[in-house]
Image (spheres, rainbow, N blue to C red):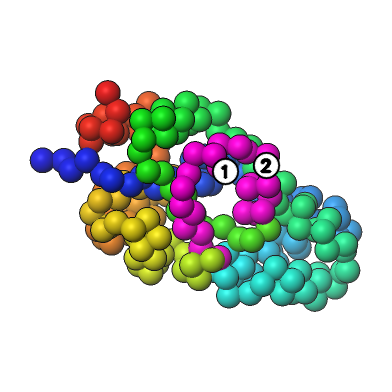
Amino acid sequence: MTITPSFIYFDLGNVIVNFDHRRAARQMAEVAGAAEERVWDIVFGSDLEMEYERGAISTYAFYEAFCSRTQTCPNYEALLLAGADIFDLNQSVVPLINELRDRGHRLGVLSNTNEAHWNFIAGGRFPIVNDSFEQYALSYKMRAVKPDLAAYQIASQIAGVAPHEIFFTDDRLDNVVAAQNAGFDACQFVDVETLRELLILRGMLS
């Protein structure tokens, strides 16, 4: 028998908002006056972005590393904005999130993200992120990234419920499998229609 979850975690990227890392590399390159492929290799082709998302380095340390490796000195705020202005709301999921919220279900965001990206997303551009979720399990704050087990353990503590009481959806299959191994009821996000069917099966929607 399927248990009705008491908490739902949504992944952020490619579920609630879509993003484009190539756009980030292009925009950061323009601000820094550097070659786009060089910026791509430095930020996304190395461990720099992951270390930033893991919370192992601060935003300013990320900036300093970028400057050092590109041998440039771009404006700090302009570079952060160039790297963060890469998100667009996934309009298709908004009605579903609103319906779940209006039915009184507890909702949260469980995401690999960094401080600059989160400040951009939560800065008022996407009201649903601020208005519909009560908890935010963010990798840079947890100092743990999916699919590491610690990320799910901490997310469970943040939600205040046992892992088996949590339903989680993520676009990446490796994150879903890791969540299942951590005890979550987790399914890969394919589209809103499929997610709705899964929630109906669990008694969260009718």
Query: In screen coordinates, is 201 left or right of 114?
Result: left
Q: Earlier in the sequence, mark 1 or mark 2?
A: 2
Q: Which mark is residue 130?
A: 1
Query: In screen coordinates, is 105 left or right of 183?
Result: right
Tell me the kind of residue under disc 2.
Gly
Q: Secondary structure at mark 1?
A: helix
Image coordinates for residue 14, horizontal then vertical, percent: 52, 42
Q: Nearer the viewer, residue 33 or 130?
A: 130
Q: Secondary structure at mark 2?
A: helix
Image coordinates for residue 171, horizontal then vertical, percent: 43, 45
Q: Nearer the viewer, residue 154 or 85?
A: 154
Look at 66% across and 72% down and name the residue there. 58
Look at 37% across and 43% down and name the residue there. 106
Q: Nearer the viewer, residue 187 or 105?
A: 105
Query: Which quarter shows the N terminus?
Result: top left
Kindly give the residue lying farthest to the top in the view shown: 206
Query: For mark 2, does the 10 Å Cα neighbourhood hold few (<14), some (14 to 19), or many (20 or more) residues?
Result: few
Tally the marks. Answer: 2
Circles 1 and 2: CB atoms closer than 8 Å: yes
- Residues in magenta? 117-140
Tell me the kind of residue under disc 1.
Asn
Query: In screen coordinates, is 43 left or right of 63?
Result: left
Q: Which mark is residue 124?
A: 2
Q: Is residue 152 magenta?
A: no
Query: For mark 1, does the 10 Å Cα neighbourhood hold few (<14), some (14 to 19), or many (20 or more) residues?
Result: some
Task: Measure how far apart labels 1 and 2 are at the Cα level.
Answer: 8 Å
Q: Looking at the image, is 84 positioned above or below residue 72?
A: above
